[in-house]
Structures are given as C-alpha cells and as structure tokens.
Image (tube, rainbow, N blue to C red):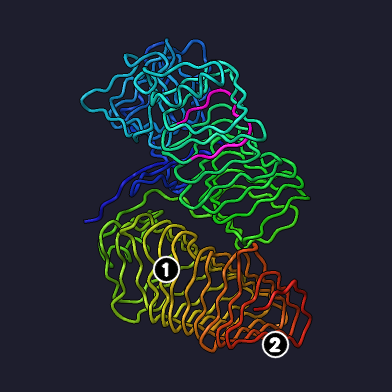
C-alpha cells in the first residue's frame, strides 16, 4: 500500500519556503511540494469581519484589510507566512497548516491553533503575552528549542545601557537585554542569551571583537563591527553590519538586513555553520564573504561590485545577483536551486544550476526497491523520501529528487543512474553504497551521512556534482570518470581517505577542502580541468598525478607530503602557496615541472627531487 503525504506549492513571491526538520537540522524542500486545494466544506461562508486564506496570494491582503479582524487558515490548506506583526485574530482550523517565519503576536493579536503551527525554521515572538496563543486538543505547534521569544527567555534579563554594565552583566550568567546604544572599546565574550532591543545599537570599535558563545542571540536593533558566533541560533530581525563576522557553529536566521562590509576580516561561515537568509544579505563593495558551510537563500542575496565571495555550497530558492566587477569564486563553489541567478563579473564557479522540476501533486515515502521504482513511474509523485533501509538489486534510473535518511545499498553490480535530478543525504544514518553510479546533469549533496563508492565505477557528465559538508566519502578501489564541467567537492569537515583509485578529469573540477590521505591514486587532469587542494594536510602516498597543458592545479594553505615514489607531473599551471608554517615534503618522490610552476612555501626533500624543465617562480627555501 502506497504511503503518500500531501504538502504545498509556494507562490513565486513567497518570502519563506517550506522546511522539514530532519536529523536535528533544518533542511528546505524548496517549491517541490505543491499546495493542497481547500475542500468544498472548507469553503463555507464566513461571518462579516472574517477572511479566509486561500493561498499565498491573499495573505498580505487579509492582513492589510481594516475591515478584517479574524483570519482563518481552513482545513486542508498549507500556507507559509514570512515575517508578520499580528494585531488580528488568527484561527488555524483542524487539518490546516501555517508555517511561520518570524511571527510577532502583538497585544491585540491572538492565535488559536486547532490544526498545526509550524515554527521549526522561524521564531514566535509573544509580545502580547502567552495568553495570546491557545492550542486546542486537535492542535499542535511544531518548534525547536529556540523557536520562541517570550517572557520566559528574557524574564530574568539584566537590562544594560553602558559598556561597563554589559561587561558586568556578562559575568552574571543571566540573560541580557541591551536598552541603549553601546560602543565597545575592547573585546568581550557573552555566554548567556542576549537581546538587542529595537531602536538601539551595539557597536564594536576596530580593536574589539564581540564573541557570542553557546546561547541564543536576538537582534531587533542594529549590530555593527566585529563579531564571532558559536551557539544554537542567532535571529536577526533588525540590521547587522559586519566587517569581520565568523559563524563557527549553529545557524543564523536572517529576517532583516545583513551587510557584509569592507574590513580587515571577512563574513565567514565555517563548516558546521548554516546561514538561512529570508531577508536581505548584501556583500558590499570590497567586502569578502567566505562560505565553508551551507548558505540557503530564500530572500535576496547580492554581491556588489568589487566584492568577492568564496563559496562551498549555496542553495538559492529566491534571488541571487553578483555585480559586474565582483568575483566568484576562488574555491569553485556550487550554486544551485530554483531561484533566479544573475551572475555577472568574474566567475570561477564549478556548478551553477537552476533546477526546474515539474510540479505535480504529491511526494512519497518509499520503503523498498519496488516502491522506489513505482514512485519514479508515478506522474503524481514530485519527490521521494527514503526513511527506512532499502536494498536495490536491479538497474534503476532516478529522475526525481530523493531525500535520504536511511541506508541505500546495492547488492550486485547493477547501475544506479541519476538523470536531471538531485539526491541529498540528510542525517548521519543516511548512506548510499553502490558499485556502478552514473550521474547525468545531477547533484548529490552530502550534508551528513556517508557516500560509499568502494570498488565502484563512477561516471559523471553534463555538469554533475558530488559535494560533501559534514559527511564522509569513501571511494577506495574505484574508477571515476568526470567530463563536461562536472565537479567533486570533498568534505570540508572530515578527512577523506582513499586507496588504489583512479580519476580522469575532462573539463571538470576536483576540490579538496579539508585534509586528504590518498594511497596508490592515479589522477589525470586534462582539457581545462581544475584540481584544487585547500585542506590542512594533504598526504599522497605512491600516487601519480598528471596535469596536462590546458589544466591548472592549486595547492594552497596546506602541508603537502609526497612519499613512496609519488610523481606529480605538471604540463600546465601548478601553484603551491600558503602561510609561512606550510611545507612541501618530498620523500622519495618527484615533482616534475614541464609547464609553469609557482612555489612560495618551504620545500623539504628526503631522497626526493624537484625537476624543472619549464618556468619556475619561487621564493624557494630548500632543506
């Protein structure tokens, strides 16, 4: 018996798109889930002063109409509300679903939940008090630990109006509420919940950094300067002006305005960090944005002229624009999604796709190979969830989005082909184990989990990509063929190890963003391909790397070790650069340059050699 779950399709102008909380993280389903039509009995006449939500198009209209005092979300209707200050009564009928971004309930506002209020990717701000929201026996609120801003979160908050008071309050262990403009003259660390009130500002001078560590931050006002954040969630309803911003862990949910400004630092999202933009994010002139994590844009994201963005994975659900003199993107990032892309300026993008899936009526959970195949053939199924382990014993072609939170294993050498679609591994229990993988204009994103390609044949073409964030990737004893601008981006968090494997790159990119340890690998890069190594440690043991005359290889900010008769032969462009502490170690191995080579870090040789039969630029220190 088929198990089908109906959801929604968002209107083009919707600010906030659908999300599902899986494995403890927020993941957007984009506009792949169509809106359900209200049933006939839900369309009965309403009393005067009542207004019924029929879809995304009339939400703002009902909120603005002065003669409407009560708004109804009918049963069987699923709608999304972006940012809203509610001063009316809102009734969510049984069977109805309202997904809210930032929902502030004022003194005259009231929400009666008889169906479902989903605030898992947003916040519920109870300005009018807890009595202004009620939940019936049939109702439920889906939320996270940080979904509510109410009196309980800041009821014991210490109000501060000066820098001295803020420093003192930071040592108290109590939540803090900033009630007046404050300029910090020195660095400070805050480990308690913090609220910046509306109409006030918190500013750091050039010599100071404000570090948030571990707790929720809510900004209604304005934050300016240098900031580091590691915690559960930072909610911005106001404005953030950052010349040096570091998101180490947790997430930023922006419903207001974030401006990345020119400065000595950058606006950085490290691995383990997630930026969800539902408002406006602007990388201003000469600013630098570095994304080693995940950026998901459901609002407006603009990279202005002379700004630069180095990206790992950028998921665009609404609007992205880069200026004509902007630069994208040193790390060969992946940009994808259904939103609008206006790419201008200098680009070095690995994959840039506007995914345009057909819109049908349903998506489906599958529990077996037979159900998976049937879902592919069912014209009404839009997307597929794998929530229980599946074993595949026959060839299968996947043409629809697949979200994986359980193992998928192939018992034989049958072929799994992804064609014009994507697969996303959502949690640490997710894995895909196959011996024969073909990707045609498709994308595998490994947010968590494991992609096991052991003793496998992998063929990637027409701009296909495999990208990993927190997950693990294994491709030992495999043969990989990449062509037509395809890309592999290895995990930026976990070290990648692989033994006795080969890869042939034809007009494609291979990006290593974290430490690697390859043994017996054969890497052949040709026809304008691009090989990039950025990890802390890069260890090649008995490997053979060949770069043809049209290809470029970069090893930057890494300790590069070649040992055990390893050969790196460059016929194109080879750049080895980094920090003073970085080293190149040749242990019974050879770098043979026949093209153009730049070497700007220390070289240490132990029975190894650098043979130059081309052009060499260096500040070489040999030992």
Q: Give the x, y percent position of residue 431.
A: 34, 64
Look at mark 1 in the image and give the residue it sits on: 473
Q: Is residue 221 magenta?
A: yes
Q: Is residue 60 magenta?
A: no
* Residues rendered magenta in the picture: 217-229
Residue lying at 52% horizontally and 46% vertically, measured from the top left? 296
Crowd around label 2: few <14 · some 14–19 · many ≥20 (10 Å): few
Depth check: 40 or 255 in front? 255
Depth check: 545 or 158 in front? 158
- Looking at the rendering, in which quadrant would you find the N terminus? bottom left
Nearer-N-terminus badge (2/1): 1
The residue furthest front is 623
Crowd around label 1: few <14 · some 14–19 · many ≥20 (10 Å): many
Magenta-colored segment: predominant secondary structure:
strand
Name which quarter of the figure residue 374 lies in. bottom left
Look at mark 2 in the image and give the residue it sits on: 611
Q: Is residue 317 left or right of residue 26?
A: right
| Disc 2 from disc 1: Cα separation | 34 Å
Q: Is residue 510 left or right of residue 436?
A: right
Name which quarter of the figure residue 436 lies in. bottom left
Residue lying at 33% horizontally and 27% vertically, measured from the top left? 42
Q: Could you say which disc has been placed on residue 87 in the image?
A: none
Task: Evaluate whether residue 26 shows in this view.
Answer: yes
Name which quarter of the figure residue 424 lies in. bottom left
Q: Give the x, y percent position of residue 348.
A: 68, 61
Q: Give the x, y percent position of residue 285.
A: 75, 42
Task: Evaluate whether residue 401 shows in this view.
Answer: no
Dot 2 lies on which element?
A: strand
Q: Give the x, y percent position of residue 270.
A: 52, 50
């Amino acid at each position: 018996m088929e198990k089908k779950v109906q959801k929604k399709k968002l209107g083009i102008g919707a600010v906030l798109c659908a999300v599902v909380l899986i494995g403890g993280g927020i993941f957007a389903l984009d506009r792949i889930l169509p809106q359900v039509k209200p049933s006939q009995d839900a369309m009965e006449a309403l009393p005067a002063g009542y207004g019924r939500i029929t879809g995304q198009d009339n939400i703002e209209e009902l909120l603005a109409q002065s003669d409407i005092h009560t708004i109804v979300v009918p049963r069987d209707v699923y709608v999304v509300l972006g940012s809203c200050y509610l001063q009316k009564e809102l009734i969510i009928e049984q069977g109805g679903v309202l997904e809210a971004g930032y929902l502030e309930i004022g003194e005259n506002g009231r929400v009666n939940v008889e169906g479902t209020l989903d605030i898992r990717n947003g916040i519920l701000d109870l300005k009018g008090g807890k009595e202004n929201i009620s939940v019936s026996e049939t109702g439920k609120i889906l939320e996270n630990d940080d979904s509510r801003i109410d009196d309980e979160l800041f009821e014991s908050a210490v109000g501060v109006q000066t820098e001295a008071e803020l420093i003192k309050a930071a040592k108290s262990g109590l939540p803090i509420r900033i009630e007046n403009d404050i300029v910090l003259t020195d660095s400070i660390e805050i480990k308690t919940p913090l609220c910046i009130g509306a109409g006030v500002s918190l500013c750091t001078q050039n010599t100071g950094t404000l570090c948030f560590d571990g707790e929720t931050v809510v900004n209604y006002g304005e934050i300016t300067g240098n900031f580091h954040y590691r915690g559960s969630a930072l909610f911005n309803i106001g404005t953030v002006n950052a010349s040096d911003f570091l998101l180490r862990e947790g997430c930023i949910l922006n419903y207001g305005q974030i401006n990345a400004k020119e400065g000595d630092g950058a606006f950085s999202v490290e691995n383990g960090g997630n930026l969800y933009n539902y408002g406006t994010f602007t990388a201003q002139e000469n600013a630098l944005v570095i994304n080693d994590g995940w950026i998901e844009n459901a609002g407006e994201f603009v990279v202005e002229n002379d700004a630069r963005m180095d990206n790992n994975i950028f998921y665009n659900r609404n609007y992205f624009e880069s200026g004509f003199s902007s630069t994208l993107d040193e790390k060969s990032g992946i940009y994808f999604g259904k939103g609008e892309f206006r790419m201008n300026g200098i680009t070095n993008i690995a994959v840039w796709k506007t995914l345009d899936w057909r819109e049908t009526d349903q998506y489906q959970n599958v529990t077996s190979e037979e159900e998976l195949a049937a879902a592919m053939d069912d014209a009404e199924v839009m997307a597929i969830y794998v929530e229980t382990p599946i074993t595949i014993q026959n060839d299968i072609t996947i043409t629809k989005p697949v979200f994986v939170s359980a193992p998928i294993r192939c018992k034989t050498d049958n072929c799994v082909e992804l064609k014009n679609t994507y697969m996303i591994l959502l949690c640490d229990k997710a894995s895909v184990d196959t011996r024969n993988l073909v990707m045609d204009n498709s994308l595998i994103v490994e947010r968590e989990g494991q992609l096991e390609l052991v003793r496998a044949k992998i063929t990637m073409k027409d701009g296909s990509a495999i990208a990993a964030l927190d997950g693990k990737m294994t491709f030992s004893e495999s043969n990989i063929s990449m062509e037509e601008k395809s890309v592999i981006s290895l995990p930026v968090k976990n070290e990648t190890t692989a033994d006795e494997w080969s890869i042939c790159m034809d007009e494609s990119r291979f990006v290593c963003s974290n430490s690697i340890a390859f043994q017996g690998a054969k890497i052949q890069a040709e026809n304008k391909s691009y090989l990039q190594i950025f990890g802390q440690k890069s260890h090649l043991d008995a490997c053979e790397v060949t770069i043809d005359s049209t290809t470029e290889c970069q090893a930057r900010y890494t300790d590069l070790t070649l040992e055990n008769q390893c050969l790196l032969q460059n016929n194109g462009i080879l750049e080895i650069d980094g920090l003073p502490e970085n080293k190149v170690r040749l242990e019974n191995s050879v770098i043979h340059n026949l093209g153009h080579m730049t070497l700007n870090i220390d070289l240490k040789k132990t029975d190894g050699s650098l043979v130059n039969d081309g052009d060499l630029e260096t500040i070489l220190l040999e030992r």
